[in-house]
Amino acid sequence: MWTNLRKKIFSPLAVPVWGYLSVIFMGACFLYLDPYKSAEVSFINSLFTATSAACVTGLSVVNIGTEFSLFGQTIILLLIQIGGLGIMTYTTLIMVLFHRKVSFFDRVAIKQSLSQSSAFSFKKFLFGISLAVFCIELIGAVFLYLLDPIGFHPYSALFHSISAFCNAGFSLYAESLIPWQGNIGIIGVFSILIILGGVGFSVLYECGANIKDFFLRKRKKKAFFFSWQTQIVLETTFMLLFIGAALIFFAEQIAGTATGNIKDDILIAFFQSVTARTAGFQTVNLSNLSSVTLLLMLALMFIGGSPGSCSGGLKTITFRAWIGFIVSRLRGREQIRIGRFALEPQSFNMAVTMTVFVFLAIFLGVFSFSIFENNFIFAQAKNNFFAYIFETVSAFSTVGLSLGLTNGLDMAGKIISMLLMFIGRLGPVWLLMLLQSLQRPVHYKLAEEILPFS
């Protein structure tokens, strides 16, 4: 019995859980032992910062630009990079580098983590995506430095480039990117890095292969060929980005909370649509935005990024599955069509399960905040109630945006936020698979009945 339990607890699916917990605890110890840190940084604040960094969230109870020394900031940067690429990716890459044999079960676990199909070159994928990530981050840092050498000195440029690509949202500046809200170059670089980090490693890998074949003229016709999954991810990503930006722009114009400068308003609306998809950077004080804009950003945070990426949330694929389901039912079709294919019933069942799981996690988060933050009377807590919802979705979707609630969290609130970030970073799919693997298989079926739903 204990042998089987031990095997389940230390199964390949559980490796990321123990990996992230180990990295978070080690990171918290290093941050707490930073000899030049501020006296305000307690161990719980160090643990919160390490959790937020490893889970690439960006929520912070201290100002990392002033409270931590260069040593502490470097530890945070390493945690962001490890969390962005994933513990499993790093572990397997080390095994490959040292010519150690990677087991079949480890391959299955990593493919599930990176949302890959069964047919791909394992070593080629790992080396290719790691090299691509480092190159993208380095290029982003160079552009930030060239565009503003004073605001983004070499270390700051590298820090913010890695933070942007990993969708972490950590900034060395207390005002985040507000000083550059009208700078098209700086905002453009951050937007590109965030989008690239949020589309998923498999999409980046496939796009890179297409670009390589295109320039090497390996095809007779100059055209890009994408798999069904990549096509759906790209279509849904850009649809959410531009529709979100348009809605935010008009919401601010109607509410009268816009700056009055059309160019800046368009740039602010676009970047808020980008960053709300799990990045966490700000070009405007969120408290100055209209309630409609905050509600739109809440919806974007809930959806999140794409599978196998640095982002969290419900995921674009799940959102697209629900859109396909609604459209198919309105048209009277039995199959759920998405693009050129129909979705398998098993895949949609997974989408339903994920959605229920996400809603349940958010409900429990808001419920816990309402209890432990001592706001039992709605008349007294109504001003903070939306902030609790916003904070919960931001933590679970690993976004990092806050309406000011994070800085005032007590011990219980910090623990709740850390749990939400940790569960959100692992992802609903991985957690559900892990929980299912711990259950005993059922070798029988019960008689089925029909329930009336109307």
Image (spheres, helix red, strand yellow):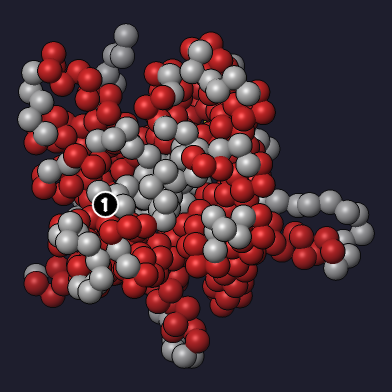
* Residue 427 visible in the displayed image: no
x%, y% of residue 368?
A: 14, 35
Image height of 131 relative to 410, above or below? below
Between residues 152 and 142, which one lies in front from this camera angle? 152
State the SS at label 1: loop
* Residue 91 visible in the displayed image: yes
**Which residue lies under the disc numbered 1?**
62
Q: Quadrant of the C terminus?
A: top left
Between residues 163 and 319, which one lies in front from this camera angle? 163
Residue at left offset 69%, top offset 57%? 207
Residue at left offset 25%, top offset 41%? 406
x%, y% of residue 262?
A: 65, 23
Crowd rating for badge 1 (residues with CA inside 10 Å; few <14, some 14–19, many 20+) = some
x%, y% of residue 215?
A: 84, 64
Image height of 383 relative to 303, above or below? above
Residue at left offset 44%, top offset 84%? 95
